[in-house]
Image: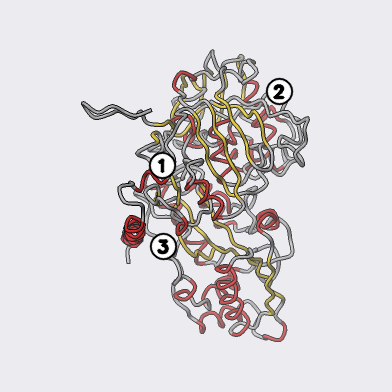
Amino acid sequence: MNKLIKYSIFILCVCLFIGCRSSQVQDSHVPGRDIAEARPSVRNLDELTVTFSRHDLELDFRKSYFSSEAQLFTAIYEGLFTYHPMTLEPVPALAERWELSNDRMQWTFTIRRNARFWNGDPVRAEDFKAAWLSLIDPRRDYPYASFFDVIEGARNYRNGTERDPNKVGITVIDSRTLVVNLESPAAFFPAMLCHHSFSPIHPSMINREQWSPQNNQRNWTPPVSNGPFRITSMNDESIVLQKCSQYWDRNNVTLNKITVKFTNTADEASNLWNSGEARWVSGDVNLDALTDRSGIQVNVMFATHYYFVRSSEKPFDDHRVRRAMALVLPWDEIRSNYYLPAETLVFPIGNYPEVKGITEEDHEEARNLMAEAGYSNQERMPELIIRLTPSRDAARVGALMAAAWKEILGFNVRVEVISFDRYYQSLKDDGYTVGSVTWIGDFADPYAFLKMWRSDSSLNDARLNDPDFDILVDRSMIEEGRTRFNTLAEAEKLLLERGVVLPICYNPALNIIDTGEIGGWYHNPLDIHPFKYIHFKTLRPLPGVALAN
């Protein structure tokens, strides 16, 4: 079945679920009381409370990894471009204007004269250059460092083969002029610049190791940021943001205060919505506990949940072994519990060619591949470690995988469960074979999913080193349009056919927010909603009707 048709069916089912549940609530609520009034009315139209699921929040955007951090960063940091809240097209932010050379390899940006950090200091071209170079510092291991490889010399500097930072194509002409030279033309460069990793850093923060408070420390100083909001306080329970008086576009920012509450459980988030305290719930929530379901928002997201095979050690560095592993999995059973089962890594987007993944078992081909790779004697098979999160679904999928790899291919399989707070960091460590990730594209382009598998990518947790794949990705960098998409599709097909990526499902985004009450929040494929545009809608009475105080 066409994936988009499946998604439409899924949305229809969710809508029917919401409708049925809402009808049940209406049947049992107090007569004469509208369901939307189950939450107290808004008193402060310039203050918003949001809930995020609790985890160790990292304020240093160079180190960040979680989608909730990316959402928070739309409030406190800003680069040359920012996301349009509806289309995600790049919108000029600190870039007042820019010029592109005839060969499309050089971008010259002019920074706004009134661009300021919250302490009043001007944002300079030097602050961009210092921030970008610090993020690709070869002594560091920042997750998004390889995103900068599009810039001339950045890859060599990041990998330590070039030690001179002046060889990286980032040049400061004066305090307001930044010149960036690319390795090859990249029409999507402005879209990349929307990502928080391309933000400037205040000089006082560039070498500061800890930006977040440690153990509720009392003398903590918030980071000096440059976004529409600044942090005024933060502890284990919440983070409070205040509208920044120095922000260049402050007249178009409606909210004066944002409070983000960190919830431990789905029930806690539901209770904050029911009480009216939280006007937007982002993260785990108990839908059955909601007294008002009118705010349930479900939308397609440019995100995929997948397992991957770590390819740095034998025999898993052999693509024949990885393909054999993929061919013995009971795919129908594994993907049966999901509304949007995924056969590919990249969620289908316009003009991107259809890619076929592995969907059926073929035990005979799997055994032949293992024999070709020199592993026909099952008694000598190495240990295979599956690293999982402590969730029921992960346990289900892990058990199905373990059974297939043990019974059909003869691996000695061990399952290892890691707590949520340590899991994603553990994927960067050694000592396992198979792990899982839900990846949200950082900009709406297949490159956002495929770049991370390049051999020298800072996001390559699979430790894949496949020259054929690298060549395809590099080739796509000098192509455009449909030709480029065809090359990227070839690269994705290679990942799937060689058993590097084992796609499970596409992830819809779930939020609880009443868009009749709150404006500036739109469905989009990255589930990113810049705080700058969010506002409470003005309540206007019908003619002849007065609003009660």
Which residue matches tag 2? 203
Which residue matches tag 1? 480
Amino acid on which the number 2 mark rests in the picture: Pro
Which residue matches tag 3? 340
232 or 1: nearer the viewer: 232
518 or 526: nearer the viewer: 518
Counting residues from the N terminus, which is met first, the one under dot 3 or under dot 2?
2
Query: Does any portion of residue 139 appear in the rendered image?
Result: no
Q: Which label sits in the foreground, 1 or 2? A: 2
- Estimate the x, y position of residue 510 in percent, counting from the top left: 45, 51
Q: Which label sits in the foreground, 3 or 2? A: 3
Residues at marks 3 and 2, CA–CA distance in whole angstroms: 46 Å
Identify the secondary structure beneath mark 2. loop
Identify the secondary structure beneath mark 3. loop
- In-image side of 313 versus 254 (left or right): right
Identify the secondary structure beneath mark 1. loop
- Estimate the x, y position of residue 360 in percent, counting from the top left: 44, 76
Counting residues from the N terminus, which is met first, the one under dot 3 or under dot 1?
3
